[in-house]
Amino acid sequence: MTRLAALTALGAGCAVAGAVALARHRYVVVTVEGESMSPTLADGDRVVVRRARLAAVRSGRLVVSGPPSGERWDHLPLPMWLIKRAVAVPGDRVPKDAGPALRALTEERVPAGRMVLLGDNPLRSLDSRQCGYFTSGQLLGVVVRRLPHTASGNSRSRSSPGHGGRAVPGRTDPPWRT
């Protein structure tokens, strides 16, 4: 192998490694746990999420956000991430008829740095109906696509959803999971 060929191969390898590293930093695969987004997404579905800032979120898009925080929520066993539909972003009208926490808000329009997130299944969703606004700091990104199911199906145990098949003593799962 000539020196030029070796340098070309090394450069191509570095380019591929850099592209893979960039993609891994920009995109995340998230597994849905629970029923809060049914019928759109089901327990065990996997989605690709593009990391994004609030400015990239549009009403109607599915997003991944951190759970609510504060003294009301900090003692609850909440999941690390929630998958919800953005129904109002900065400048949009606050959908006050959607739930009690939204009716209590004084603003008519969503302020900068905030968003209203709702699950598609209101009976099984922890979202803005109960906790008001989510912040731009809680946002992980925007769902860009659902991945197809594998031929072997979902390998997670259904006996203890959200815990990788492990039983967690003394813990009751809340009615929301995603």
Image (spheres, grey):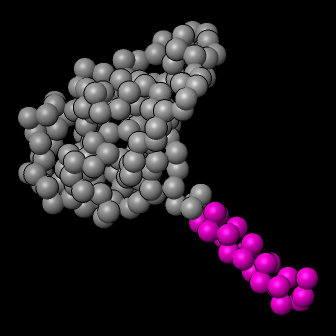
- The outermost residue toward the bottom is 4
Query: Magenta stretch?
Result: 1-22
Residue 49 visible to an observer of this rendering: yes
Q: Quadrant of the C terminus?
A: top left
Q: Residue at x 21, y 59 (%)?
A: 90
The picture places residue 175, in percent across and down from the top left corner, at 36, 17
**Residue 57, located in which quarter of the rendered image?**
bottom left
The picture places residue 33, in percent across and down from the top left corner, at 46, 27
Question: Is residue 36 covered in magenta?
Answer: no
Question: Is residue 12 covered in magenta?
Answer: yes
Q: Residue at x 52, y 45 (%)?
A: 29
The picture places residue 108, in percent across and down from the top left corner, at 8, 51
Q: Is residue 90 left or right of residue 3?
A: left
- The outermost residue toward the front is 1
The picture places residue 36, in percent across and down from the top left corner, at 33, 27
Residue 103 visible to an observer of this rendering: no
Q: Is residue 76 left or right of residue 154?
A: left
Q: Residue at x 85, y 82 (%)?
A: 6
Between residue 116 and residue 83, name the one nearer to us: 83
Q: Residue at x 27, y 49 (%)?
A: 61
Q: Is residue 24 above or below residue 71?
A: below
Q: Is residue 51 above or below residue 143?
A: below
Q: Is residue 120 above or below residue 134?
A: above
Q: Is residue 163 above or below residue 117?
A: above
Between residue 63 and residue 11, name the one nearer to us: 11
